[in-house]
Image (spheres, grey):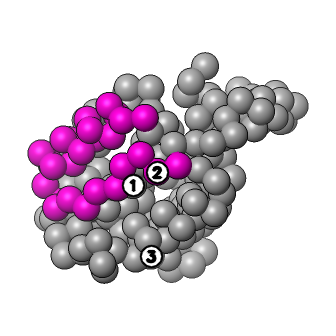
Amino acid sequence: MMTESSSHEHKQKAAEQHQTITLAIITVSDTRTKDTDVNGKYLQSQIAELGHELALYEIIKDEPTQVEAVLEEAASSPAQVILFNGGTGISKRDNTFDALSRKLEKTLPGFGEIFRMLSYEQIGSAAMFSRATAGVYKGKVVVSTPGSPKAVELAWEKLVAPELRHLAYEVGR
């Protein structure tokens, strides 16, 4: 378990060693296009605003084979962090969590737990329907959030962006 001082030290080292982070954005949707993908546009603007780089941006259907294929593509890219949005609910068409959970080599249960806690503050008990998750695959951090714009913003602003350099540092050690 990290102490506050070791966490601070790691964040300091991360900031020194990882000035620029390379990311991939994967929107999982049966209906969105690059013109209508508000999440993709939001994340791209946030990444650029922080001075980071985008290695890959894809929109795929919520089909397990497509999720797995784009995960492989992103893992083979220069991306250090892979951001999925969409397909984390409980409907028959929500397959992202299932496809990713079969592939993740390490999981970060705290991400989903904290995301649902923060989401509960915004939307109430429906937050329990979210299967937001994060983990590591082939040396890359994988983060998967619901596809609603508010969920993507919440995850980015409260969890991902504040720890981006630290995530890249830890997975690369």
> Which type of secondary structure does the marked residue at label 2 adopt?
strand
Instruction: Give the total of numbered labels.
Output: 3
Residue lying farthest top?
173
Q: Earlier in the sequence, mark 2 or mark 3?
A: 2
Q: Are marks 2 and 1 in contact (CB under 8 Å)?
A: yes
Q: Is residue 75 above or below residue 48?
A: above
Mark 3 sits on what residue?
A: 149
Mark 2 sits on what residue?
A: 54
Task: Identify the amino acid type marked 3.
Answer: Pro
Position of the C terminus by quadrant = top right
> Which type of secondary structure does the marked residue at label 1 adopt?
strand
171 horizontally vs 90: left or right: right
108 horizontally vs 60: left or right: right
Residue 20: say if magenta: no
What residue is drawn where x is 38% and y is 31%? 137
Q: Point out residue 72 in the picture as x, y percentages from the top left corner.
A: 26, 35
Q: Tell me where the magenta segment starts and ends, as one range.
A: 53-78
Task: Identify the amino acid type marked 1.
Answer: Ile
Q: Earlier in the sequence, mark 2 or mark 1?
A: 1
What residue is drawn where x is 53% and y is 49%? 53
